[in-house]
Image (cartoon, rainbow, N blue to C red):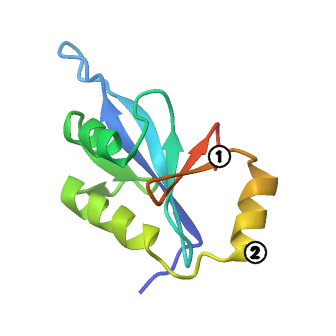
């Protein structure tokens, strides 16, 4: 088993019907031992809209270009959102590093760019 410190996930959007080129959009990041950070944008405002956004767009890939089934991705997000290892140190790190952590309906959303 390979354990990575953190993995980013993207979804394909706006696939060109003529050339097949797709744009990818960052969905969020899973870091080992921590809650999933959903990339907050104006395309969705809560977990319900986030799931709808996923269902209405293309395939999901991790940063290693491994395709992830949409249902598996949603299950992973939900599993990591209830991860009990989120703690005080994590909260301080996220707030200091990014200063844009928003908790909506128990899910961690992060505004702005992050790696």
- Badge 2 is on which residue? 89
Query: Residue 66 location, x and y as percent?
Result: 33, 57
Apparent side of residue 75 relative to residue 34 in the rendered image (left or right): left
Q: Residue furthest right?
A: 96
In what quadrant of the picture does the N terminus appear?
bottom left
Number of the front mark, 2 or 1: 2
- Badge 1 is on which residue? 114
**Relative depth, front residue between 10 and 90:** 90
Q: Residue furthest bottom?
A: 1
Query: Residue 40 location, x and y as percent?
Result: 52, 40
Query: What residue is drawn where x is 56% and y is 73%?
Result: 34
- Between the C-alphas of marks 2 and 1, the distance is 18 Å
**Relative depth, front residue between 20 and 61:** 61
Q: Residues within 10 Å of mark 1 (few under 14, many from 20)?
A: few
Instruction: Tell me if residue 114 comes above or below residue 18 in the rendering.
Output: below
Q: Residues within 10 Å of mark 2 (few under 14, many from 20)?
A: few
Query: Residue 30 location, x and y as percent?
Result: 50, 64
Q: SS class of the residue under badge 1?
A: loop
């Amino acid at each position: 088993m390979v354990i990575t410190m953190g993995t980013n996930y993207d979804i394909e959007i706006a696939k060109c019907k003529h050339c097949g080129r797709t744009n990818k959009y960052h969905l969020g990041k899973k870091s080992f031992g921590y809650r999933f950070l959903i990339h907050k944008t104006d395309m969705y405002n809560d977990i319900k809209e986030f799931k709808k956004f996923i269902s209405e767009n293309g395939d999901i890939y991790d940063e290693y270009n491994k395709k992830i089934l949409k249902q598996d991705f949603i299950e992973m997000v939900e599993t990591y959102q209830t991860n009990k290892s989120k703690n005080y140190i994590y909260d301080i790190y996220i707030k200091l590093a990014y200063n844009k952590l928003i908790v909506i309906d128990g899910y961690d959303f992060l505004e702005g760019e992050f790696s």
